[in-house]
């Protein structure tokens, strides 16, 4: 029979090795040369940006849409649900400032799912002129070469190119906590999964070829799950294709955050992952420092490990994260690292809360798993 000491040492070694392996894989994804794209020339691209309300740094992020240096034809389509939304004059002013760019704001809402963002995008998808279509959230800052970078990742077996956001420019501690979740935790795991050939989508940035999504049922197919990124991953894999990630993640200015806001957002995303991929989500409890730390303390109390093992664990765990953050260009000051520790201590609570209920609130909209496919229920 395996003793408690053997089990504890084995699990400690396994969780630590998994952490280090994910960092090594993410570092490879960030720095390795990518295969050549199979897209010839500069095909036309439609960029869809759903907008709703006055978000942090919204003028800067939306203005960045117009700054593309892509040499091919580009159509910009901004989608809003209501004419009364305060973002409407902002978008119209930006369009007026760029008269030489093919850009339009479309107003309206068509309920094809329980996902408000998809319902907002229906009119934009229908108005898209080109076969390559980018769905980009309004709070992502788009560098001038964002379209070239997306095109460059489209290899032979690609069905979708995506990029989780890299959190930048946090203005308080809770903003740094948000970036800690986005960068060296969620971004790391998503990059490492892509490096291992198992990439999955992130709703911030979804770059489609029209026929791939249309063959699966169009935008309505993305309403089959609580979040369009989970549904997108399933659509692409069902087609026998791969989701590819940009190695250099596109940035999201974080600004100021409140702790309850960060907590609610992380629980919401965790619920989405749990409902979309329950078996994988079950293992998430082992991805942070909490379990290895508890094991280390237990083994110290049992006299199996020396007292300095706690310091060694912290140094190894977050030292590796620091190296990845520096390589990727993510925030990595001492204060950022302190928030990495807090993030990992919060993960078990978030993991547990995500098992409670099948609904949440997003931008003032109550969403529930029973509402994701209203057309099918009808």
Image (tube, rainbow, N blue to C red):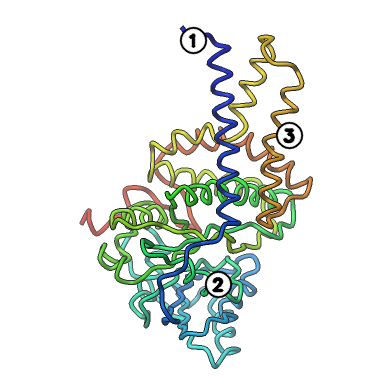
* Circle 1 crowding by C-alpha within 10 Å: few under 14, some 14–19, many from 20: few
Q: Nearer the viewer, residue 140 or 190?
A: 190
Q: CA distance from mark 1 to mark 2?
A: 53 Å
The residue drawn where x is 31% and y is 66% is 212
> Residue 361: percent from the left, percent from the top?
47, 51
Query: Taking 99 as reference, is 155 left or right?
Result: left
Residue placed furthest toward the top: 1
**Label 3: which residue?**
315
The residue drawn where x is 25% and y is 66% is 215
Q: Name which of mark 1 and mark 2 comes first in the sequence.
A: 1
* Circle 2 crowding by C-alpha within 10 Å: few under 14, some 14–19, many from 20: some
**Label 1: which residue?**
2
Disc 3, SS: helix
Q: Name which of mark 1 and mark 3 comes first in the sequence.
A: 1
Q: Name which of mark 3 and mark 2 comes first in the sequence.
A: 2
Residue placed furthest toward the left: 378
Disc 1, SS: loop
Q: CA distance from mark 3 to mark 2?
A: 36 Å
* Circle 3 crowding by C-alpha within 10 Å: few under 14, some 14–19, many from 20: few
Picture disc at residue 146: 2
Query: Taking 13 as reference, is 359 left or right?
Result: left
């Amino acid at each position: 029979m395996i003793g408690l000491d053997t089990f504890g040492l084995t699990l400690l070694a396994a969780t630590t090795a998994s952490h280090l392996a994910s960092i090594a894989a993410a570092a490879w994804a960030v720095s390795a040369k990518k295969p050549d794209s199979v897209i010839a020339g500069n095909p036309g691209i439609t960029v869809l940006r759903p907008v709703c309300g006055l978000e942090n740094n919204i003028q800067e992020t939306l203005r960045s849409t117009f700054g593309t240096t892509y040499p091919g034809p580009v159509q910009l389509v901004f989608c809003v649900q209501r004419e009364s939304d305060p973002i409407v004059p902002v978008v119209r002013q930006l369009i007026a400032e760029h008269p030489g760019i093919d850009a339009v704001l479309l107003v309206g809402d068509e309920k094809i799912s329980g996902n408000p963002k998809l319902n907002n995008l229906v009119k934009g998808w229908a108005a898209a002129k080109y076969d390559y279509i980018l769905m980009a959230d309004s709070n992502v800052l788009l560098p001038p070469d964002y379209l070239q970078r997306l095109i460059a990742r489209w290899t032979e077996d690609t069905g979708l190119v995506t990029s989780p956001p890299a959190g930048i420019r946090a203005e308080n501690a809770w903003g740094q906590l948000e970036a800690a979740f986005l960068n060296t935790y969620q971004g790391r795991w998503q990059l490492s999964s892509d490096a291992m050939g198992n990439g999955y989508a992130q709703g911030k940035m979804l770059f489609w070829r029209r026929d791939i999504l249309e063959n699966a049922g169009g935008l309505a197919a993305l309403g089959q799950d609580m979040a369009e990124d989970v549904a997108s991953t399933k659509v692409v894999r069902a087609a026998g294709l791969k989701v590819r990630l940009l190695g250099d993640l596109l940035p999201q200015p974080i600004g100021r955050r409140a702790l309850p806001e960060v907590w609610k957002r992380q629980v919401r995303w965790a619920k989405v992952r749990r409902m979309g991929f329950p078996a994988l989500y079950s293992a998430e409890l082992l991805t942070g420092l909490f379990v290895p730390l508890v094991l280390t303390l237990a083994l110290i109390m049992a006299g199996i490990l020396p007292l300095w093992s706690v310091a060694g664990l912290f140094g190894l765990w977050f030292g590796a994260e620091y190296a990845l953050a520096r390589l990727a260009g993510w925030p990595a000051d001492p204060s950022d690292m302190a928030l990495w520790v807090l993030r990992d201590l919060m993960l078990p609570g978030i993991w547990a809360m995500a098992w409670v209920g099948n609904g949440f609130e997003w931008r003032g909209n109550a969403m529930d798993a029973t509402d994701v496919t209203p057309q099918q229920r009808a």
